[in-house]
Image (cartoon, helix red, strand yellow):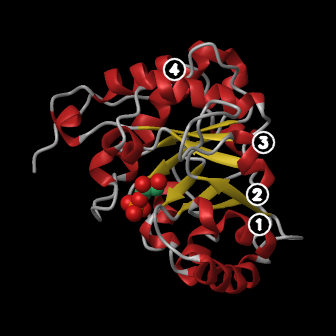
């Protein structure tokens, strides 16, 4: 597989190394996708809560399927672990069979929601316009947003990575303030494929995203965390987290096992 290498992208603005330390706590979230029943959720969290007890310098969230949200919230009561939904609908209530409102996930004990995941874009035809409405609805209800963007393999290979990221940010976050938004960079070619982005590829994309956020939010953008997703594992998390603009991770497959996810939230800081 041939990758076209983009010319190296680095922040035009201040280096954010210092900002990372002072402003942004790492944020690491598990996206379970369509996995785990209620008993499986309880079993995972029973183990994970103990393993995560000493991880005090990182924000942790777990996103189970809707059916397990209440059980998950119950299991993490009194801990620092937050619960996230994997999606919401943007209307408050009404005749929308099968949909779940922001108030309903709050009701289940969620503080966050994942919006615009590439699987929702790909299999459920979610457009940037729909995603924008969902982000607005989440924010109006005080729900923290994990806003996902990322290019496909074809887009990367034809040199369109930055154009895609720019468009997804501009449309998805149109007329939306930056507070309470975590951006997840998830290159589609790295999701579930075992092919993680190299730290340099992740850093380059994150630096670009940071600059786009600065266009929208000015210096306030330095408070927005940009997390990486796509085949994150206990083996590669340390080198990804060492990147200047990588503030955390959104983890699929490797978050389904408590020990493996615990190792990820306890990533080791590599000195460069
Ligand atoms: P994997 O970690 O399984 O590649 O999934 C990444 C992802 O899509 C997280 O949202």
Q: Which residue is mark 1?
A: 73
Indicate which label's residue lies in the foreground, 3 or 4. Answer: 4
Q: Which residue is mark 4?
A: 212
The CA distance from mark 4 to mark 2 is 34 Å
Tell me the number on the disc at residue 108.
2
Check contact, mark 2 vs mark 1: CB within 8 A: yes
What residue appears at the point 45 percent right and 44 percent down from the top-left corner?
117
Q: Disc 3 and disc 4: Cα gap in Å?
A: 21 Å
SS of the residue under disc 2: loop
Q: Is residue 223 visible?
A: no
Work out whether mark 2 precedes mark 3 in sequence or the reverse, and give the earlier one: 3
Which residue extends farthest right? 78
Is residue 51 or residue 113 the one in the foreground? Answer: 113
Front: mark 2 or 3 = 2
Marks 2 and 1, the one that precedes in the sequence: 1
Q: Residues within 10 Å of mark 3 (few under 14, many from 20)?
A: few
Which residue is at 41% across, 43% downward?
120
The residue carrying pointer 2 sits among few (fewer than 14), some (14 to 19) or many (20 or more) residues within 10 Å by Cα, namely: many
The residues bearing labels 2 and 3 have C-alpha atoms spaced at a distance of 32 Å
């Amino acid at each position: 597989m041939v990758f076209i290498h983009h010319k190296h992208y680095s922040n035009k603005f201040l280096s954010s190394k210092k900002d990372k330390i002072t402003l942004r706590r790492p944020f690491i979230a598990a996206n379970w996708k369509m996995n785990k029943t209620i008993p499986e959720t309880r079993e995972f969290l029973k183990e994970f809560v103990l393993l995560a007890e000493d991880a005090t310098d990182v924000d942790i969230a777990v996103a189970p399927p809707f059916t397990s949200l209440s059980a998950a919230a119950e299991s993490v009561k009194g801990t620092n672990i937050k619960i996230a939904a994997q999606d919401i609908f943007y209307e408050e209530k009404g005749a929308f069979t099968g949909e779940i409102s922001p108030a309903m996930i709050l009701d289940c004990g969620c503080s966050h929601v994942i919006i615009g995941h590439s699987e929702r874009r790909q299999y459920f035809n979610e457009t940037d316009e729909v995603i924008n409405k969902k982000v607005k609805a989440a924010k109006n209800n005080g729900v923290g947003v994990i806003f996902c963007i990322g290019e496909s393999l074809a887009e990367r290979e034809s040199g369109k990575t930055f154009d895609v990221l720019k468009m997804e940010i501009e449309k998805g976050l149109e007329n939306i303030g930056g507070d309470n938004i975590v951006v997840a960079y998830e290159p589609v070619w790295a999701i579930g494929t075992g092919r993680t982005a190299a730290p340099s590829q992740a850093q380059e994309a994150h630096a670009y995203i940071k600059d786009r956020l600065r266009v929208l939010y000015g210096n306030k953008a330095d408070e927005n965390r940009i997390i990486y997703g796509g085949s994150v594992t206990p083996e590669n998390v340390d080198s990804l987290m060492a990147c200047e603009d990588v503030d955390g991770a959104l983890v699929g497959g490797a978050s389904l096992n408590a020990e493996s996810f615990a190792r990820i939230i306890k990533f080791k800081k590599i000195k460069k």
